[in-house]
Amino acid sequence: MSVGIQSEAIDIAAEYAQLVGDKPGAAVATFTGYVRDHTDQHAVTELELEHYPEMARKVLEDLGQSAAERFGLSNWRIVHRFGRLAVSETIVWVGAVADHRGGAIDACELMMDTLKTDAPFWKREQGPAGTQWVASRDSDTQRRARWQSG
Amino acid sequence: MASGTVSITIKLFSALREALGESEFELALADISEASAQVDVAAVKALLSRRGAEWKEALNQPNLVHALNHKVVFTDAAVSEGDELAFFPPMTGG
């Protein structure tokens, strides 16, 4: 039940082993996000992630805690990177352990949908035309809103 | 800022930090209360907007996010000594 905010690559195998431990719950779900080489409009050669360290940690810890309460998780972990990232590198990794697959999968979705709009990270893309800050997407806001009721 | 001055910390991130050329500075509470009856986020925005056209434009964009002590707030949130108030565009992590 913890948060990692780091510039180095995410060691997925180590994260998974740590999440599951010696006594795996009945269901484990994880999600890994990677740097894409394109957006809807143009190619991307590199990504830079700025963040607000103290607030990012608080938001992600609160998010993991609320997912744990909502879905009865026995363990969870959120890892988010900052700094310069090359195409195909990992950006984010979340994992959840629950009694049933629904809780584990839903918890990962909740954590991802919420962190995209609520955690203070900002992407800047480098492409053939130079660098630009990534604009927030309405689709992300809509996905986030799904979790506010029910 | 002289020691002993009652102040808050202002932080700027992302495109806002870049546009305004500052990432962190102190703001005296006395300057805010002198400029406005309510010492809140709106008053801080109004005071900083006096710094010039870039500041006014950047701090009054409709999707600006304000975080007081690491929590997103509305502009009517009161600010007090030692608070950390951050301004930034919508977040785009993940």
Image (cartoon, coloured by chain):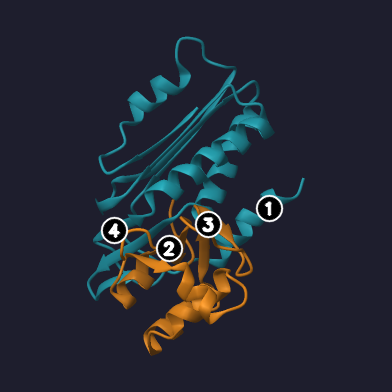
Any part of residue A137 in sight: yes
Q: Residue at x 52, y 79 (%)?
A: B34
The residue marked by circle 4 belongs to what chain? A
In the rendered structure, which amino acid carries the disc numbered 3? Thr
**Nearer to me, A119 or A23:** A119
Q: Position of residue A96 (x, y in %)?
A: 54, 29
Q: Identify the residue position indicated by label 3 in the image.
A: A117
Does residue A98 appear left or right of residue B86 in this picture? right
In the rendered structure, which amino acid carries the disc numbered 1? Arg
Q: Identify the residue position indicated by label 2 in the image.
A: B7
Q: Identify the residue position indicated by label 4 in the image.
A: A47
Sequence-wise, the earlier of marks 4 and 1 is 4
Q: Identify the residue position indicated by label 1 in the image.
A: A146
Cα separation, mark 4 vs mark 3, equals 18 Å
Query: Which label sits in the foreground, 4 or 3?
Result: 3
Cα separation, mark 4 vs mark 1, equals 28 Å
The residue marked by circle 3 belongs to what chain? A
Q: Quadrant of the C terminus of chain A?
A: top right
Q: Residue at x 57, y 17 (%)?
A: A25
Label 1: element kind = helix
Sequence-wise, the earlier of marks 4 and 3 is 4
Which chain is painted in cyan?
A
